[in-house]
Amino acid sequence: MSLHVFLYGAGVPSTLDSPPVPTLDASARTAPRRRTRVLALPEARWALLATAAFLLALPLHFADAPGWTYGPLYAIAYLAGGWEPALEGLRALRGKTLDVDLLMIVAALGAAAIGQVLDGALLIVIFATSGALEALATARTADSVRGLLDLAPATATRVTADGEESVPVSRLSVGDELLIRPGERIGADGRVLDGTSEADQATITGEPLPVLKTPGDEVFAGTLNGTGALRVRVERDPADSVIARIVTLVEKASRTKAPTQLFIEKVEQRYAVGVVAATLTVFAVPLAFGADLTGALLRAMTFMIVASPCAVVLATMPPLLSAIATAGRHGVLVKSALAMERLGEIGTAALDKTGTLTEGAPEVTAVRPATGSGLDEDALLALAAAAEHPSEHPLARAIVAAARNRDLRLAPARDFAAKPGHGVTATVDGRFVTVGRPDSGLDTDTGTDTGTGTDMDTDVEGGTVVRVERDGALVGTLVLADRPRADAAETAAGLTALTGTSPVLLTGDNPRAAAQVATATGITDVRASLLPEDKVTAVRELQRAGRKVLFVGDGVNDAPALAAAHAGVAMGRAGSDLALETADAVVVRDELAAIPAVVRLSRAARRLVVQNLLVAGMFITVLVLWDLLGHLPLPLGVAGHEGSTVLVGLNGLRLLRESAWRRPDGGRPRAL
């Protein structure tokens, strides 16, 4: 049996002239949410019925009520929760394998046969619940992969000799010419023929800012067009687009991921065969030497009970579940016991840049009035923010936010105009103000590869330089950058200390932007300009070198690498649905320092698992030998069996203590 426990645009003109400014809502970056309802799964419905019947029977049993009051309820629990694992066990048996599914069902029935109905029902309920939660985890991951396809529009506007026509994206062919209006999603991978705009392609490359698109630049299906209109020639069949390949990569990586199991599951086949063979021997040998049938059956059932893997299962699960609960209190949702175990096995870490090591959004990092402008920092920032206030561009929003953070008054702007890729103009307090990029409004080095091939002015801080002019004269510049998170360097150092190797930075951003973040965080191995399949290749290269890789990311473009890695962690606040569902764990509050802390917690849980297995093994050995070599009274056997179960269970709960959570700096994040 698998022991997974899942805690867990408006209409616009069709011409290229004077397009309206669309609202680029952040929600447009992610696909519509499709979620399988829990009770839509038959496994969940059967598990709920079994659990409800068990919980109704329990108080009646302990109150010494007549057997007819709780007996039928126990029977319902056995049937509802046991029929499916019993069927799976029989199918495995027909395939000449014996697994713990069947052994547990036989042990539960054996317990009922000798009067231990409660023990058997509890085993059944545990089996049914874990199976239902595993089915839910599988369904939710499938939901998110299907939802990813919704990023690409269903139809596109194809330009023909007779005008324009709306066609399904699936009917597009290489060479078709498309019209992409402002605010629309691009329908196919292709190249710009005419027009200027900016595309938000964070879903593909993870770049934090929209990328300028001019004739000759490549565009990707599913990315969001900005304020300009584009004519695009289709260069890839829709079935072979980057977004379609991401879906294929996630599914393929999930299928081909090296099979790993909880520690105890690795020996379940041999253990199951051994217990069944030993039970039959304990029953048959005394009969062969003249023992009575009842005595031989009682001894065999006692053996089955004391040798059953209940204590061994609990030796594994409580430490891992306690670790999951403790991690959850501190903002890390670990989706399963298997995921918690994997986190402690990692040998190196690979980190995404935008939205993971960085905040994922531009911020004003410097305000520089020009000499002789007569403006100080606040006046320059207020002037730029007033002009940018009507704009929906991410840089404009960052400038306005910076002004508001300083409580600056913004004068009203009139005659506002925006030109894609150039900047904005407006009249502020009767003065003509231009806010744009250097070199007559052309693109500067933003830490984003625009594909223009032009070597623009750069800032020593590696950010985006914005030029502010008033009545044609330069009055100052602003610098905006996607800042590293405050705990990024601490996290990189913590992961280095845990794994013995420095993390690897894997990003779709350009080498200069990647190097800037790597320098700030102390990372030396940097791999930039990577498409989603390139990240998967990098992860697999590390794993072929003998390292178990932890990948940390947040975007749709990170999902294939999250699936391919030994363990994946997604940043929760801005993470895409696909990344959140594909990852083994989610950092709910985006607190990077929680990642090395949860790895430490996982390793502590693994140590407790080993301790518990030794204790459980010792109890089982003593009780089995007692039953074989002497006469173990059934009540004493049950007491010893249950006592060992309780002991290892309590030992595993030690990780619920607050002291179990430690950050790299020795501090503890506040609990949720």
Image (tube, rainbow, N blue to C red):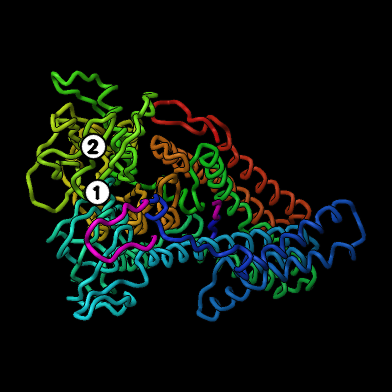
Question: Residue 672 got which mark?
Answer: none
Q: What secondary structure is marked by label 2?
A: helix
Of residues 30 and 532, the one nearer the viewer is 30
Left or right of residue 152, residue 467 in this image: left
The quadrant of the picture occupied by the N terminus is: bottom right
Specify whether 319 is left or right of 52.
left
**Amino acid marked by disc 2:** Val
Q: Position of residue 331 (x, y in %)?
A: 50, 39
Q: Quadrant of the C terminus?
A: top right
Going 51% across and 52% down the picture, which residue do you hit?
337
Determine the residue located farthest toward the front in the rendered image.
430
Q: Position of residue 162 (x, y in %)?
A: 22, 81
State if disc 2 and disc 1 touch (CB < 8 Å).
yes
Provide the residue span drawn in magenta: 6-23
Q: Which mark is residue 507?
A: 1
Type of the residue with mark 1: Thr
Above or below for 221 versus 427: below
For this rendering, which residue is in front, 338 or 360? 360
Let me know if residue 419 is in the magenta part.
Answer: no
